[in-house]
Amino acid sequence: MDHRRARERFIADMKARGVGEWTSVPPLTRLLWALGVDARPPTFQGMGTLALGYGGVFGPLWGFTMHFRVWRNEERSSVLEGIVTSIFAGVLFGLTMA
């Protein structure tokens, strides 16, 4: 059985168990598949991989957003403080989502 058939079989099996198609394979995983990346669905990934993936994306995005919306206007904010806060937010978000 090739990888494409295995993916289709997984989706059909999850659908038969009552799990929605977009829940069993989220849009980001589908996008990676469309780009040719052989990514496993989140169901088959470990906690560390999920935490690193979610936190690694969330932390920098949240940090840039906070910098341009809030921290840039504060007199006492420093870049190092913003980086540390972004890392902390990414770790917390990643662990919570995993």
Image (cartoon, grey):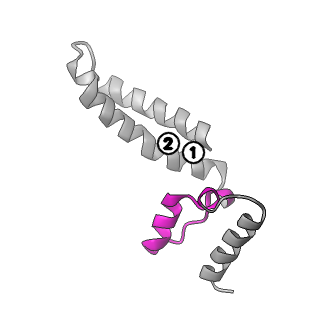
Kind of residue at badge 2: Gly
Mark 1 nearby-residue class (10 Å; few <14, some 14–19, many ≥20): many
Q: Are marks 2 and 1 in contact (CB under 8 Å)?
A: yes
Report if residue 7 lies within the magenta region.
Answer: no
Name the residue located 65 percent from the left edge and 82 percent from the top edge: 5
Label 1 secondary element: helix
Q: What residue is shown at x 35% (from left), y 31% (from top)?
A: 83
Give the vertical position of 25 relative to 63 (above or below).
Answer: below
Which of the two residues, 87 or 2, is positioned nearer the viewer here? 2
Q: Is residue 48 left or right of residue 84?
A: right
The residue that appears at 24% across and 16% down in the rendered structure is: 74
Distance CA(mark 2)–CA(mark 1): 6 Å
Q: Residues within 10 Å of mark 2 (few under 14, many from 20)?
A: many
> Could you tell me the amino acid type at mark 1?
Ala
- Residue 39 percent across, percent down from the top left: 55, 66
Q: Is residue 56 above or below residue 45?
A: above
**Quarter occupied by the C terminus:** top right
Along the horizontal axis of the image, is 25 left or right of 64? right
- Residue closest to the far right: 17
- Image location (x, y in percent) of residue 8: 64, 76
Question: In what quadrant of the picture does the N terminus appear?
Answer: bottom right
Most foreground residue, 48 or 6: 6
Q: Which residues are magenta?
A: 22-43
Location of mark 2 (residue): 55
Q: Position of residue 90 (x, y in %)?
A: 48, 36
Mark sitting on residue 75: none
Tell me the SS state at disc 2. Answer: helix
Toward the top, the furthest residue is 76
Q: Is residue 34 magenta-colored?
A: yes
x and y percent of residue 73 in the render?
Answer: 21, 19
Name the residue: 59% across, 41% down: 97
What residue is disc 1 on? Answer: 51
